[in-house]
Image (spheres, rainbow, N blue to C red):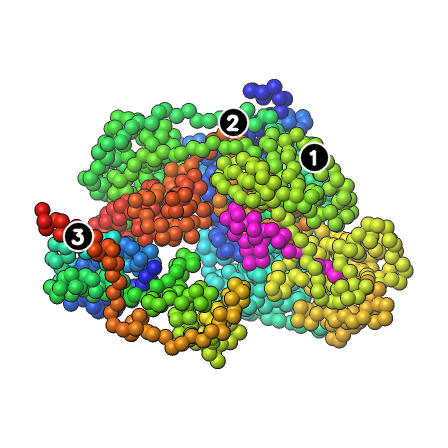
Amino acid sequence: MIVGEQKPIDEIWGMVKDFKKVLVYGCNTCVAICHAGGGKEAEIIASMLRMKAAQDNVDMQIDNAAIERHCEPEFFEPLDEKVKSYDLVLSTACGVGVNFLADRLAGTIPVYPGINTSFYGGVPEAGFFVELCGGCGNCILHLTGGICPIVRCSKSLMNGPCGGTDKGKCEVSSETDCAWYLIVERMKKLGTLEKLFEVQPPRDWSTGTHGGPRRVSLEHIRAYEEQEEKKAEGK
Amino acid sequence: MSLLSNSTKRGSVLIVGGGIGGMQAALDLADSGFKVHMVQRDPSIGGTMVMLDKTFPTGDCAMCMISPKMVEAGRHLNIDVHTLAEVTSVEGEAGDFKVKVKLAPRYVDADKCTGCGDCEVKCPKKVLSEFDQKLGQRKAVYSLFPQAVPNTRAIDASQCLCLNDPDKKRCRLCEKACKAGAINYEDKGKEIELNVGAVILSPGLERYDARVRQELGLGRWPNVVSSIQFERILSASGPYKGVVQRPSDQKHPKKVAWIQCVGSRDNHNANPWCSSVCCMYATKQSIIAKEHDKNIEPTVFYMEMRAFGKDFDKYVERAKNEYGVRYQRAMVSAVREEPGTGNLLLKYAAEDGKLATENFDMVVLSVGFQPHCDAEAFAKTFGIDTNQYLFPKTSPFAPVRTSRDGIFAAGIYQGPKDIPETVLQGSSVAGSVMALLAEARGTETVEKELPPETDVSGEAPRIGVFVCHCGTNISSTVNIDEVVNAVKDQPGVTYVTNTIYACAQDNQDMIKQTIREQKLNRVVIASCTPRTHEKLFQETIREAGLNKYLFDLADIREQCSWCHKGQNEVATKKAIGIVKMSVAKSRLQEPLHSETVGVTPACLIIGGGIAGMTAALSLADQGFPVHIIEKDNELGGLVRNVYRTLEGLDVQEFLKDRVEAVKEHPQITVHTGVEVKKTDGFVGNFNTALTDGSTVEHGAVILATGGIEYQPTEYLYGQSPNVITQRQLEKTIADGVNPAAGERYVMVQCVGSREEPNQYCSRICCQDAVRNAIAIKEQNADAEVVIIYRDVRTYGLREDYYKRARDLGVIFVRYDVDNKPKVEQAGNRVKVKTWDFMLNKDISFDADWLVLSTGLRPHPTTDQVGAMYKVTRNPDGYFLEAHVKLRPVDFPSEGLFVAGLGHAPKNIDETVTQALAASGRAGVILSHKKLAVSGIIAKHKRELCMSCLSCLRVCPFGSPYIAEDGKISHNEVKCMGCGICAGICPAKAFQVNNFRDDQILAMIDAAAESEAGVVN
């Protein structure tokens, strides 16, 4: 799941205060689950901004809305006309959603982010989120006991811990587990410790964020869609 | 004869004393099919707890906790509260007693009185208030305290000007002030006769009068106060409105001293017993005082810190470390006033024996409890035996039974104890009575007949608003006519009127009639407070055929006229806002229908120790099938290794007797060598699978998983043949091995207790040591016993045995946790070296036996069972009850109860008490054929839900769950309507009935429109 965190209200206010008509636009998927930018949070942010505007005697209209997901065009369609009537959209979706909507609005209206997109993570307990995957595009979790060294090791080391490992903790913070300590302990339990003696060659980071924007294309689905489109044209 | 059965037993119970213990018993009994008569000497129920400011460790306001219980007891259809009443005679036998009760004249007709208090305002006679411990004043016509139940006044005949005038012509101002015509100077009181099946005695104790101890200066130096006076000083509703100040000059004291054991633990000048509660209340008072005024520097002068209860030691540690409370181990010998300053000079011997004098701004005497001055006559009236101190005679194996069959004792009357244990005993006597009178259950209770509900669905709102004057309580501050006019044209309002007392009987009838005539389908009453009157008015509209949830109370007294007295204009404005808010909410109200669920009348008990067996027998005697699940192959639990109680009773005999009774009881099924595998369900409807493949259907569960003894690793245990545990010594004594002359036993206390990571008192070890020491000394006076201790915690009446041990020549040597005794092997003996505080150096003993008093731990299965039933454990691993003060055997989820060592370390008598209490609480549920679920619950809209699990994780009652389709569903039966889910749900899929977002928003809009709340 994508985890996001609301921006401080003062920062948001700084972004929106010069506009006359603002829509706070929530996304009811990942960021709703992490209590950052769903319909409810959009409503709360809008309400706080209205109060701020009233306090500062700023004459502006602030409304709120939300849709199921900000990363697929069909969800946007029913509200497109409404959205276009605003001067600014404050999106509380993740960065994907902000990009997606900004592209869709194609420079007619600005789209600003209401939240910071933090990471892909799990929710081990209510109100607590942890980063567990870096989205590097070339998974090696089968080699590391299901523990990702890319995000869980502060240095993304691939061949064991650095000298900063300290009784199972990382030198960066005593609250951070040393990923390589965890990996070794886990592999011991799994009885696969010997796998760690295989040296991992330097990684090809081009599948990660260092090789330009990434795309995934499912040819079998795209082929089907094209076929359907052709059929429709033929009629 | 009962009316419905052939039993000769009565289905009603007399409870003498309306404190928290009596109330708990009354509510448990009345909620499970018994008629209750409560007799209370004071003009209100409430007892001691109502006088307290806050309770530890949660800092909850005592009144806020007890007041709802008082209201519930006062309003219960099957509880008759007789105040200003005393029992004069009891005839008959268990199951059928004839009781005569004398009711003193109240001079106020409680049926007519609405509790408005106008009489009190007009009464010219001021009297020192007993409730405020004579630090404040009351009138001659008065209620004991503002939240008194019954909510009516009484005239103090000894003070009233009219009643003291032979012609009764003087004054009569209260009569003129009373618009309800409730004053009756001719009241003569009366005598009534009651037929009951059982009698519960919970009259409480009185406090030691510390004026007797003249050297401590109470009543002589104004800045010396008793601890109960200090409670009133701390109380926001007390004489100083919660400001800590000195009585002499209203200055804020800086250095405040608490002197412990005033009137307790002193068999020369006062009472020999320990009052059990003073160490902790002094700690609480010093913390609360510090919270009220951070400049206060508290010092507690004490002999021994008896923090023996659950989490008590942690609280004391917090007082020391977080609040800087100073604990000085010393008995203060004299308190003198410093001339001119009002300060007090305290004389005491410091730990090294040197005399010290210290100056304090204020002194609090921690006074103890003692039986009422008429305790002997009281016992005689009820025909029960007492001990030498006039406490009722009870046994550790049957702690709530008196010497007379059918008469039970509970609360501090039974022996000094704190609030949770008093509440426990309340439920415990209730459980005992339920067992005694099982066949008469339901024979004398009444149910209300109600007309069918009118269907108002689809109708446009027709709201009736009744604005109450509450005598002059509201109308002297709020302009009622303005409120009426302002509400008239609110949308949906079709009728508005004012009324002097909405709650008076004739006006209730008027409201019902208006509902019918005006075809009202919603009612708003603007009046006093929902705390006492919401249920009453809900019943009123229900009697007129409206669903009770179509009512709303606009609180314009406690939240308006009272707190804005003298600001009539703004108060009126605010009242208008409050009423408009209620009307806005009312427009959106819907009739709510409570679901009911059936109840499987059987109980599952996990653990077959004393707790489990006691609860099983009590429930089985109540007529319910019981299943005991015992992991071991035999019943008995930890108590199999215990031979004698402190009092010398034979524990093994008791155990044998219980095991046999359990095995023989036709209602009890024992599953030994078996554990719970899986459990499912909710209150009234549990289904539990056992490891032997069988399943049990049951309506309630009692977790009596017990505890284990700590196995020591310190003090050469396991290395030296001379080192044994207290339990091993006990067995040797039981086996008849006699100590030789000169043989030396050195005992070390608190082994594995009261230090990190086990920062809690195991509660039983001091008594174990004292009991074994006495046994050794009694067998051979020439054997030597030394007990090396931190604090001897022989609380309550157990203090006698501490004294007996000292009298027999047992030597007590104190040690500090930072300087523990050192042990080394010395030939065929061990050498024990410890610090002596008086000599200021180490002393050593050559011991033949080093006996370790090892602590208790929760049973290892506690965690697993807890996880299975979704109940939490405290950091020490013990089950965490629903509320440490008022719900000591309940869990937050209904239908689950706890008893015995799984809850916290305790002695056998306390385990028996808690087990009986669990049986009483479980009996309340099992006695119902159906359980009604409240209408105020959260509703879950599955189509909005994203299954984010926030609700599942935060709900204290386990009502949201992951359904078979893998998505969240909601079990409304488990829901208590707290609304946490509605708050956290990011999809707004949860809405609490009658507190829905649209209703709250409508209220906020209404408030914003009328600019209410702008009160400076």
Q: How far from the left and from the top, in percent, is residue B641?
A: 74, 50
Identify the amino acid type marked 3.
Answer: Gln
Q: Using residue B510 as the reference point, say whether residue B828 is left or right of it.
A: right
Is B145 or B604 nearer to us in this picture?
A: B604
Label 2 marks which chain's residue?
Answer: B
Identify the amino acid type marked 1.
Answer: Lys
**Membership of B671 in magenta stretch:** no
**Membership of B868 in magenta stretch:** yes
Q: Which residues lie in the magenta part?
A: B851-879
Answer whether labels 3 and 1 touch (C-beta < 8 Å): no
What residue is shown with label 3? Answer: A227
Answer whether labels 2 and 3 touch (C-beta < 8 Å): no
Q: Using residue B743 as the reference point, say whether residue B922 is left or right of it.
A: left
Residue at left offset 78%, top offset 55%: B728
Identify the amino acid type marked 2.
Answer: Thr
Q: Using residue B780 as the reference point, say whether residue A15 is left or right of it.
A: left
Q: How far from the left and from the top, in percent, is residue B593?
A: 36, 33
* Whether residue A85 is situated above or below residue B836 in the rendered picture: above
Alpha carbon separation for disc pair 3 and 1: 78 Å
What residue is shown with label 1? Answer: B663
